Every structure is written in structure tokens, then in C-alpha cells.
Image (tube, rainbow, N blue to C red):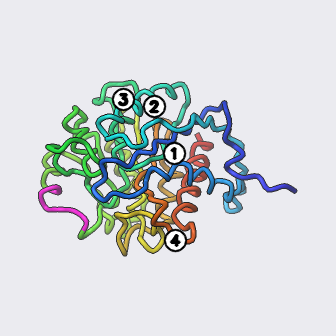
């Protein structure tokens, strides 16, 4: 029997949309995150559509809408093209946005087509992403930018925040804004399902949810192609479980994957993690 891969699900129609946003400019640590969308698409050929554990065969059609023309653009200049691309995918029930660096998260939130007050944002990230905005938007400040844009802090839950990866000032600012803070230690002690239960309960009254999956939340040994990943990070299995669980939520309209730099990858480890993330998102969506 011929091998069927996740790549075979990509086409011109479908209730799930996939968009590449190859943005690299504006990174705190310059690299080649712009290579990520195409690298992930290639890696999808190596991921089967069959989950032996769940006895699940994925047959979801995914509309690959191509890449937004943001390569080389600053986050400020790339804002509108990404917002428009996300808005154009609104008829699909779920959009997968492949970054690119974490600056893509802000325009994606604006592209959902509802006031920011109605949006709930969950991040899986080692970092608060609360750097100052006096130098403009960049991959280190999408959360602060969104707060300044009018997204209420109470609408935000940040999961997987790591020790030795943030500042006390950012922590204080996140607390003052009312952001739900869930550390990596809590995820490991309580389990990711318990943490997600708390986050989803907190956001129960938000009509639309989006999830920012910053791949640097994963342990660096399992994710060498993420420049911000640290030793002792989130196990990849926990990351995958979170992707499947959150994609099953009907209110989740958009998920993004950010901060993968293929130029740093070793033996395609991070590319395969990213490709498996796509499979887990589709598996979760199929449960709706």
C-alpha cells in the first residue's frame, strides 16, 4: 500500500487553511526563520496520516494558501499583509499560520475579524514577549504590542514560561496587566491537561481563541532549531498533547508556529517536530 503523508492533504480546498509567513526581520537574534514555512512543508512528506495510538486516519483537506510576501520586511511593514492574509482565510474553520518569527502573532490576532476585546490568546512560550516597544514591533514584544493595541491582559494566558529566560520587570508588567501566568514548572508538576483546563476556564467567555505555539518552549535537546530554546524546557510530547487538545476546541480559530530557524537545525529534528505539530493540530481539529 502506498505511503500517504500529511503533505498529501494539502490542496486548493478545505475547511482548514495553511498560510506561511516567512518573516525574519525584527528578530532579537537574527537568523533564518524565514526558511521555516517551506522547510515544514517539505517535512510533512515524512509524517504519515495514521496515528497508531488513536487508530486514527486523517483525511482532512487543508487549503494551502501559500506564503505571504513578507520576506525581508520589518514587522511594521509586514503587519498589513499578514493581517489581510489571515482575514482572507476567515471562511475556514481553522487557520494554521507558519512563521517566521514571533512578530507574526500580532497581525494574525488583528486578522481574526473581531474586536481584540473578543479574542482570547493562549501562548506556549518560554518567554513573556514583553520587551519594550520604543523601537517598534519585533519578535520579542508581540504581547506588549497587543496589550498596547487594546487586547485586555485578562484575555491572555501564557503557558510554559521558563526560568532564566525572562526579567523581573517583564514578570511584574505581565502580572499588572492581569495576564494568566503558567510556568514550565507548573506544567511539569500538574500536567499539561490540568494547566490547559485552567487557561480555558479563564477564557471561557471569549468568543474566539487563538494559540501562539512558540517552538522555543520545547527543551533545546529536542528542538535545536529554535534559537530561544533552553535546556530543561517542555518535553516535545507535552507540546504535541497541547496542540491536539487546543485544536479540538471549537473556539480556536487560528494557531501559529513561530521561532523555528532551519539554519540551526540538526538532523531535521526541529523540522520533524514542527511537522508533527501540524499532524497533532489536524488530529485535534478532527475531534470537533
Residue 139 painted magenta: no
- Residue at the spot of label 3: 80
Mark toward the start of the polypeptide (3 vs 4): 3
Residue 38 x %, y %: 56, 49
Q: Is residue 90 above or below residue 287?
A: above
Q: Which residue is at a point 49% across and 25% down the rendered structure image?
A: 88
Residue 125 x %, y %: 35, 57
Q: In 3D space, how far apart are the residues under numbered discs 1 and 3 (Cα atoms)?
A: 26 Å
- Residue at the spot of label 4: 266
Tag on residue 247?
1
- Mark 4 or 1: in front is 4
Secondary structure category for the residue under label 4: loop
Mark toward the start of the polypeptide (2 vs 1): 2
Residue furthest to the right in view is 1
Q: In 3D space, how far apart are the residues under numbered discs 3 and 2 (Cα atoms)?
A: 10 Å
Q: Residues within 10 Å of mark 2 (few under 14, many from 20)?
A: many
- Residue at the spot of label 2: 86
- Toward which corner of the image does residue 14 lie, by quadrant? top right
Stretch in magenta: 165-171
**Image quadrant in which the C terminus is located:** top right
Amino acid at each position: 500500500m502506498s505511503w500517504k503523508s500529511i503533505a498529501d492533504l494539502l490542496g486548493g480546498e478545505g475547511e482548514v487553511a495553511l498560510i506561511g509567513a516567512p518573516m525574519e526581520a525584527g528578530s532579537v537574534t537574527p537568523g533564518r526563520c524565514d526558511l521555516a514555512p517551506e522547510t515544514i512543508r517539505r517535512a510533512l512528506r515524512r509524517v504519515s496520516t495514521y496515528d497508531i495510538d488513536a487508530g486514527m486516519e486523517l483525511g482532512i483537506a487543508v487549503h494551502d494558501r501559500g506564503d505571504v510576501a513578507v520576506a525581508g520586511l520589518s514587522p511594521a511593514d509586514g503587519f498589513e499583509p499578514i493581517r489581510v492574509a489571515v482575514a482572507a482565510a476567515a471562511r475556514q474553520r481553522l487557520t494554521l499560520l507558519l512563521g517566521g518569527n514571533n512578530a507574526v502573532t500580532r497581525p494574525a490576532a488583528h486578522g481574526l475579524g473581531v474586536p481584540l476585546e473578543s479574542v482570547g490568546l493562549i501562548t506556549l512560550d518560554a518567554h513573556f514577549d514583553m520587551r519594550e516597544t520604543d523601537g517598534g514591533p519585533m519578535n520579542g514584544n508581540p504581547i506588549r504590542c497587543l496589550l498596547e493595541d487594546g487586547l485586555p491582559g485578562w484575555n491572555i494566558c501564557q503557558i510554559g514560561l521558563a526560568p532564566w529566560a525572562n526579567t523581573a520587570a517583564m514578570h511584574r508588567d505581565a502580572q499588572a496587566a492581569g495576564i494568566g501566568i503558567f510556568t514550565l514548572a507548573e506544567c511539569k508538576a500538574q500536567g499539561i491537561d490540568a494547566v490547559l483546563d485552567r487557561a480555558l476556564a479563564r477564557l471561557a467567555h471569549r468568543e474566539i481563541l487563538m494559540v501562539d505555539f512558540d517552538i522555543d518552549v520545547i527543551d533545546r535537546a529536542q528542538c535545536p532549531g529554535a534559537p530561544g530554546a533552553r535546556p530543561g524546557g517542555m518535553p516535545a510530547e507535552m507540546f504535541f498533547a497541547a496542540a491536539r487538545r487546543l485544536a479540538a476546541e471549537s473556539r480556536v480559530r487560528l494557531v501559529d508556529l513561530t521561532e523555528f530557524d532551519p539554519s540551526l537545525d540538526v538532523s531535521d529534528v526541529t523540522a520533524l517536530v514542527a511537522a508533527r505539530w501540524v499532524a497533532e493540530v489536524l488530529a485535534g481539529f478532527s475531534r470537533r
